[in-house]
Amino acid sequence: MSNPRADYSSIVSRPPLRLPDGAKVAFWFILNVEEWDFNAKMARAILPTPQGATVVPDVPNYSWHDYGMRVGFWRMKEVLDKYGIKATISLNGSVCNTYPEIVQAMVDSDWELMGHGFVQRALPLEDDEPGVIAKTIDTIREFSGVAPRGWMGPGLAETVDTPDLLAEAGIEYVCDWVNDDQPYVLKTKSGRLVSMPYTLEMNDIPMYVVQNHRSPEMYERGKDHFDTLYREGADSARVMAIATHPYISGVPHRIKYLDMILDYITSHDDVLVWTGGEILDWYNESVGSG
């Protein structure tokens, strides 16, 4: 069946979108900060267990992820601060309780927090999807003082009801639909929900963990990706996302390439470095939010 959440719209036939001051690209940086349950099967694995067994606890794969929380996050934050980039954090709500020092550092830096489930478990596996969404929103609001405006499902996974439930809960944009370089409005039973351009192409999980590219790939691919959007953005604005995880991009052999691509993008004129919420506000003002 065709996409039940949006009618087809070719980017070449839409009215042009214009960014302020003649900018061509709105760039946003997403850092996915998650909690993996030590007493459950890991959300992802880099080291297979001998004989193909599934083991709990899975110490090597759990600690692979935990390196990102202990070390990688702080290494990445140093690079982001170097360029004055306010990240958009895709945040498991439980991180507020288990890693409060990390979340406080985000709040102190005025980064945007968006919901990413309560723990790193796909929504179709949850017994109470509305309850998980509500608990995630409430926990982030209680810690930061601000309710999240955006949402990304763990693994970008949804049920058939997810967009309706998000809109009902007050979420304004979602990142699960990676099918455009501009925002667009999703069909929901009630309320307004905007699909925000997220990415699997400029995402360190597919790039490094699935496709097994060498460390320079983030810079080399990112440069080519940005150059195309920058050229196209002269006719109609484009949105570029880079999606990262502390345990992947925050390791010593990759961090310099993250630094290099951020330096390349921010060195261009006509680029706006925004959070997801800032992109949403611009889009709603451009097309009307009724």
Image (tube, rainbow, N blue to C red):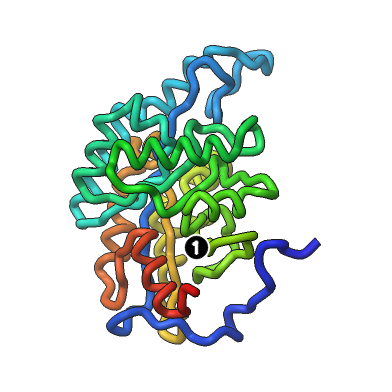
Q: Is residue 126 left or right of residue 263?
A: right
Q: Which quadrant of the view contains residue 144?
A: top left
Q: Nearer the viewer, residue 135 or 119?
A: 135
**Number of on-image labels:** 1
Residue lying at 68% horizontally and 18% vertically, measured from the top left:
52
Q: Nearer the viewer, residue 179 or 132?
A: 132
User: What residue would you read off at disc 1?
Assistant: 197
Q: Amino acid at mark 1?
A: Pro
Estimate the x, y position of residue 166 in percent, counting from the top left.
54, 51
Q: Is residue 90 left or right of residue 41?
A: left
Look at the image and tell me whether residue 255 can be seen: yes
Q: Which quadrant of the view contains residue 9?
A: bottom right
Residue lying at 50% horizontally and 62% vertically, measured from the top left:
197
Crowd band around label 1 with a 10 angstrom C-alpha radius: few (<14), some (14–19), many (20+):
many
Residue lying furthest right: 1
Look at the image and tell me whether residue 228 can be seen: no
Q: Is residue 250 left or right of residue 229?
A: left
Estimate the x, y position of residue 194 in percent, counting from the top left.
52, 64
Estimate the x, y position of residue 270 in percent, counting from the top left.
30, 77
Estimate the x, y position of residue 182 in percent, counting from the top left.
50, 71
Residue lying at 48% horizontally and 58% vertically, measured from the top left:
173
Residue lying at 35% horizontally and 24% vertically, measured from the top left:
98
Image: 95 above or below 57? below
Instruction: For mark 1, give the secondary structure.
Output: loop
Q: Quadrant of the N terminus?
A: bottom right
Image: 53 above or below 267? above
